[in-house]
């Protein structure tokens, strides 16, 4: 019982290492040396008393809580404190095992040994949630810190990303602490070179790491994966690629470098669309990707009001939306085997739909009627396919009244909307010959199909 209080004090230590325990023993030994003479004197005095009296409970003082009436061995506070410390140590050991197992599982997919993590964050720090003076994560700066030790670009800012996919990658810090990313994507950056904005850049393979307090730009990734050449001159770092200077970084008094420029979040980048040059390429796209020759004709002959062109430079001959939206089979002859000699001698028709989104008036389809002789179009919207017969009767009445001629023949693809019994009966009573194409051969009704395709291409390329 002589060292019971000293043992209790050791149990309350937070850092139970060799140096701390050694210093505690030395201090305890030093404190006990002056008491040696007093202890001998007290012992001799006790021998002189024949029958020592039993101390009263009120004179006993607990060495743990300094409260009278009980000994340290009987102290409830000491017992509770000991149980609390043992419980905390047990939980700490279990959490350490879980983190070690998780780190080993994550790194096994990236490295041959379990002691290495997938990425390394150099000298970056994390947010200390227990320190009241530590800044909040949302206060992380907007500067990109140039880090030669980081293996990948990293940032805690989610709203910076232009593209984003979930990603869970372990990241080892310089103090061997392991944190995890939650996403991976690209970030747009507007560099500033000699006080002037440079070419807009996009940093790829940027990890979203909420626990970081810094934005890290990986020099290793730029040089190894992107073939950058990095040079340092005085207090400036220059990042070049293919001989062109893309951005620079300034070195401060603490020997930390941050790149010159600013990140452009997705919300800000969308507002830059209005700065596109007013050239032939822009009007080519606005006119449903009309061919460049007709666009020039519209401008030069002033056929459309309100067109403003600030550059007549030759447009790029390769337009990706045109290639994606207008490719088609080219082995079908474009020469018609027969051409009508007069209006309404032959009328081509086809129905297109259903449209993915209905119009404000509830239309899901449209039907076309094209005169083979004049190539005059008539397009009527339909709410359902069964309305095709009604639309044909309206077209017939209008066309025959305007031209004072009769429709002699019609051609369609024999779809279900063209085959109701009343349509056949109507054509028989009006003396109209009906022509139907063979199944899966749309080029036989090429005039109507080409009309529908022109309409669809214009709408699709504008979207």
Image (cartoon, helix red, strand yellow):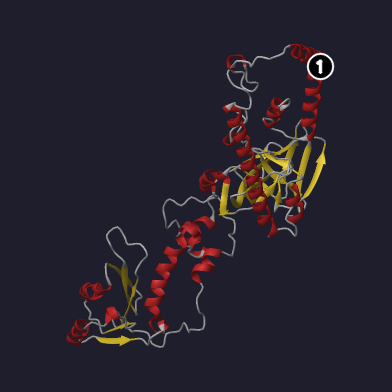
Q: Quadrant of residue 25?
A: top right
Question: Residue 89: x percent and y percent?
Answer: 64, 39
Question: Residue 119: x percent and y percent?
Answer: 70, 51
Q: Name the residue at the front extreme.
A: 50
Return the residue at label 1.
36
Q: Is residue 153 left or right of residue 406?
A: right
Tag 1's secondary structure?
Answer: helix
The one nearer the camera, 179 or 462, is 179
Q: Specify few, some or many for label 1: CA neighbours under 10 Å numbering under 14, 14-19, or 20 or more.
A: few
Which residue is depicted at the point 59% across and 54% down? 167
The one nearer the camera, 297 or 104, is 104
Which residue is depicted at the point 42% across and 56% down? 304
Question: Residue 369: x percent and y percent?
Answer: 31, 75
Is residue 393 at least partly visible in the picture?
A: yes
Q: Name the residue at the left extreme.
A: 429
Which residue is depicted at the point 62% across and 23% down? 71
The one nearer the camera, 239 or 331, is 239
Total number of numbered labels?
A: 1
The one nearer the camera, 64 or 168, is 64
Q: Is residue 461 left or right of residue 133?
A: left
Which residue is depicted at the point 27% across and 67% down? 383
Q: Quadrant of residue 191?
A: top right
| Quarter in which the C terminus is drawn | bottom left
| Quarter in which the N terminus is drawn | top right
Whether residue 146 is situated above or below residue 20 in the rendered picture = below
Whether residue 186 is situated above or below residue 213 in the rendered picture = below
Whether residue 365 is situated above or below residue 160 in the rendered picture = below
Is residue 201 at least partly visible in the picture?
A: no
């Amino acid at each position: 019982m002589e060292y019971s209080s000293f043992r209790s004090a050791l149990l309350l230590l937070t850092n139970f290492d060799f140096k701390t325990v050694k210093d505690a023993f030395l201090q305890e030994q030093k404190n006990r040396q002056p008491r040696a003479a007093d202890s001998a004197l007290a012992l001799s005095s006790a021998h002189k008393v024949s029958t020592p009296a039993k101390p009263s409970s009120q004179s006993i003082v607990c060495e743990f809580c300094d409260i009278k009436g009980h000994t340290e061995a009987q102290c409830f506070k000491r017992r509770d404190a000991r149980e609390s410390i043992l419980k905390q140590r047990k939980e700490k050991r279990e959490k350490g095992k879980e983190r070690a197992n998780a780190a080993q599982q994550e790194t096994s997919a990236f490295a041959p040994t379990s002691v290495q993590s997938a990425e390394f964050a150099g000298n970056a720090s994390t947010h200390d949630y227990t320190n009241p003076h530590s800044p909040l994560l949302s206060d992380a700066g907007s500067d990109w810190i140039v880090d030669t030790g980081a293996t990948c670009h990293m940032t805690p800012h989610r709203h910076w990303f232009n593209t984003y996919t979930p990603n869970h990658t372990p990241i080892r810090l310089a103090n061997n602490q392991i944190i995890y990313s939650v996403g991976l994507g690209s970030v747009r950056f507007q560099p500033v070179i000699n006080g002037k904005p440079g070419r807009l850049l996009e940093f790829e393979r940027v990890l979203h790491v909420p626990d970081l307090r810094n934005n890290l730009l990986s020099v290793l990734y730029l040089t190894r994966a992107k073939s950058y050449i990095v040079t340092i001159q005085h207090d400036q770092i220059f990042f070049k690629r293919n001989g062109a200077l893309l951005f620079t970084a300034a070195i401060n008094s603490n020997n930390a470098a941050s790149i010159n420029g600013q990140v452009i979040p997705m919300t800000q980048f969308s507002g830059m669309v209005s700065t596109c040059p007013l050239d032939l390429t822009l009007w080519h796209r606005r006119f449903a990707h009309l061919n460049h020759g007709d666009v020039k004709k519209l401008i030069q002959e002033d056929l459309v009001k309100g067109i403003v062109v600030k550059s007549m430079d030759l447009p790029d001959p390769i337009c990706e939306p045109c290639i994606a939206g207008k490719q088609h089979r080219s082995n079908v002859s474009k020469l018609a085997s027969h051409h009508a000699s007069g209006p309404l001698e032959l009328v081509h028709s086809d129905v297109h739909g259903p449209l993915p989104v209905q119009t404000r008036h509830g239309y899901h389809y449209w039907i076309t009627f094209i005169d083979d002789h004049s190539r005059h179009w008539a397009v009527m919207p339909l709410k359902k396919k069964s309305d095709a017969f009604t639309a044909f009767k309206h077209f017939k009445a209008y066309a025959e009244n305007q031209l004072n001629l009769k429709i002699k023949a019609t051609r369609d693809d024999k779809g279900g909307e063209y085959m109701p019994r009343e349509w056949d009966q109507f054509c028989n009573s009006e003396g109209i010959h009906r022509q139907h194409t063979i199944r899966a051969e749309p080029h036989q009704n090429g005039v109507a199909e080409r009309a529908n395709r022109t309409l669809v291409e214009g709408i699709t390329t504008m979207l």
